[in-house]
Amino acid sequence: MSFINDRFMINNEVGCRLYSEVAKSLPVIDYHCHLNAQEIYENKSFSDITELWLSGDHYKWRAMRANGIPENKITGNATVAEKFQAWAETVESSYGNPLYHWTHLELDFYFGIQENLGSHNWHEIMDSCNRLLCQDDFKPRSLISRSNVEVVCTTDSPLDSLEYHKRLQEDSNFTTKVLPTFRPDEVFEEDLKTFSQFINKLSELTSVKIHDFSDFSKAIGKRVDWFHEVGCRISDHGPIDIQYLSATEAEVDIVFSRKLKGEKINKSESIVLSSAILIMLAKHYKEHDWAMQIHFGAIRSNNTRMKNALGINTGFDSISDQCHLAQGLNGLLDAMAQRDSLPKTIIYNLNASYNDVVATTIANFQSGEDGIKSPIQFGSGWWFNDTRRGMENQLNCLADQGLLMNFIGMLTDSRSFISYTRHDYFRRILCNLIGGWVERGEVPDNKKVLSKIIKNICHDNAKNYFSF
């Protein structure tokens, strides 16, 4: 029996049944990823497996560095064969790391290769993959379609023209929806020069002269309107931590005006302004029935020398910690709720030690008034928690503190066109977890209810929650 089979990651019979009969064939709704809409539209072939597999994949880059691979074989000028060989040698050392599982899931599903990649067969596997990449089935659109993906939500700046999203929507030959996600990192920019440049571009794009916070909100609202017209139904935010300080409109306006003029603001003032901006954004999202995602807890680009050499998103990020998270998160959500501007919200924490803090906070703000089950969601295991242990921790915590039945499930959070097997990985882990509950006598073996849980989490909840 090959390493990848229907029992892979599942060690009980009920889990195997749930996976093979329910989860395995369900369509994918990938509501958070970092694919590029232009690349999907242009649908260009990949030159080789190294380009497809290793280019931009900082997960793999971190592992290769840990395996003693020199940087020129990771991000440098080594040949594509040398880079692939270096990765294959690293795979042999990655037992226990999800990269080992992801690698072989991708080889099996997309390339039909069931051999285990390593130093002994890297060249043969590389050649086999490269021969297949010449076929149309390995262009971006085909890879997405073959992965049974219904919806892809990219991540986009508020200033983006969304040209390629519109072109894709006009192309009847490609049925997967490719929708933008509103990711306004620039509105929280601490660098005064960069913030000023963003405001100037925003003002020019919206024809709104921005002198105060009200003007700023109006201009942002116009961009939200534009994204909504192009099909956007989700926003995303990536703060390091979540803090909240209340302030009057006049106090917020003073701080905003000072920052707009290029004056440095202190830490407390920065928290006041960030709080006000998030509340303002949430109001716009609520008016459009969007979901607001908040991914927090990543401290990025910690190796200054390598950041200067390679730039950001190159594999030098870590999990952060935070004092008074419960106070900040409860305060922020409460401020939105008091203003009737709390939209559907998904909270992802990178530091798993805060799982119960986040899950119990979310429960404070659930409401059935808008006809949505669990409108405030505890997001799936993210980034460094995108592992069996991380996923199981999140699923168990959500079941402890909320309703697992209403969970909207997995996402790829990836820049790769062949990372959709991560949904399959999650589904196997989910089925194994619930199957284990049944076999230990913790829940009944009610096929109807169990099937509903799996179908809801893997597909239906996300479809209903986002209303794409």
Image: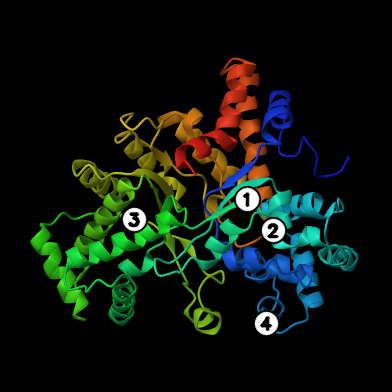
Q: Which mark is residue 176?
A: 1
- Distance from the alpha carbon under mark 2 to that under mark 4: 29 Å
Query: What crowding class fits label 2: few (fewer than 14 Cα within 10 Å), some (14-19), or many (20 or more)?
Result: many
Figure check: 334 above or below 214:
above
* Closest to the observer, 304 or 150: 150
**How many tags in the picture?**
4
Please name the amino acid that badge 2 sits on: Arg
Disc 4 target residue: 76
Lower sequence index among marks 3 and 2: 2
Please name the amino acid that badge 4 sits on: Gly
- Which quadrant of the view contains residue 248? bottom left
Q: Quadrant of the N terminus?
A: top right
Q: Would you say the residues marked 4 and 3 are in contact, meaning their CB atoms lie under 8 Å apart?
A: no
Please name the amino acid that badge 3 sits on: Gln
Closer to the observer: label 3 or label 2?
A: 2
Disc 2 target residue: 141
- Distance from the alpha carbon under mark 1 to that under mark 2: 9 Å
**Element under label 2?**
helix
Lower sequence index among marks 4 and 1: 4
Closer to the observer: label 2 or label 4?
A: 2
Query: What crowding class fits label 1: few (fewer than 14 Cα within 10 Å), some (14-19), or many (20 or more)?
Result: some
In the rendered view, does 314 fall on the left or right side of 112? left
* Closest to the observer, 369 or 261: 369
